[in-house]
Amino acid sequence: MNLRIPFLNKIIGEIADGSVILLECDTGIGFHVFLEIAKKHDDLTIFAHKRLKRVFGKKVIYPNDEYNLQQLYTIPLAIKKCKFKIVMFTILHDLFSIHSTDSVCNLFTEVANIVRDCKKIMLSSIDTKLISERALSMLENESDYVIEIREFMDGLKIKRGIRVKKSLTKPPSDFYSLDLEKLEIGDKLI
């Protein structure tokens, strides 16, 4: 499947059904990428807060609608009911603030297995500054693709870099410059 986002297609290629993609990034960047994907796809469901319904439209399933953040067992049930091919999972930070790391990582594993069984594609975003290394490695281990977006200082300018950290079909890549305004990948960063 093609995500219709040129820079993601360029670095990870075609995505097989049943894939789990983890986007590791700095604050706000994951939301921007998810927003661009949501604009280009009608066949997706977004697990997010109710306040994001005005941004993403009717594609959002929010807490207390079909699932409950305090009752983890409701989330896999809601994902099984999703009729769309792509599932965007934006509630990881909320879950980590409510539940233990082990509980959230076990939930992520369960959800990933459901996605694989149902031949869906799941995209998750996590802010690496707000999560422990242990939790991050547990999420990476369960993901099929891990894409890392980082901000680097270059004098007084901030540069963004993107790389594939883990892939089913390709080796890890170097960092390449990323223009979020145009959503384009540039030259290799040194």
Image (spheres, rainbow, N blue to C red):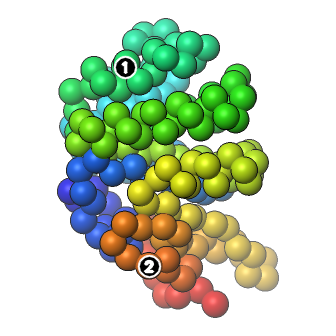
The number of callouts visible is 2
Q: What residue type is labelled 2?
A: Pro
Q: Is residue 183 above or below residue 101?
A: below
Q: Is mark 1 on a helix, strand or loop?
A: helix
**Badge 2: residue crowd in 10 Å (few <14, some 14–19, many ≥20):** few
Of residues 137 and 32, the one drawn nearer to the viewer in this rendering: 137
Identified at 32% across, 60% down, the residue is: 5
The residue at which mark 2 appears reads as 171
Q: Where is residue 82 in the image (x, y as percent from the top left)?
A: 27, 25
Q: As shown in the figure, which amino acid type bears the numbered disc 1? A: Ala
On the question of residue 149 being in view, the answer is: yes
**Left or right: 71 as drawn, with respect to 170:** right
189 over 86 or under it: above or below:
below
> Where is residue 53 shown, x and y percent of the image?
42, 24
What crowding class fits label 1: few (fewer than 14 Cα within 10 Å), some (14-19), or many (20 or more)? some
**First along the sequence among labels 2 and 1:** 1
Residue 78 is labelled as 1
x%, y% of residue 179?
Answer: 50, 70
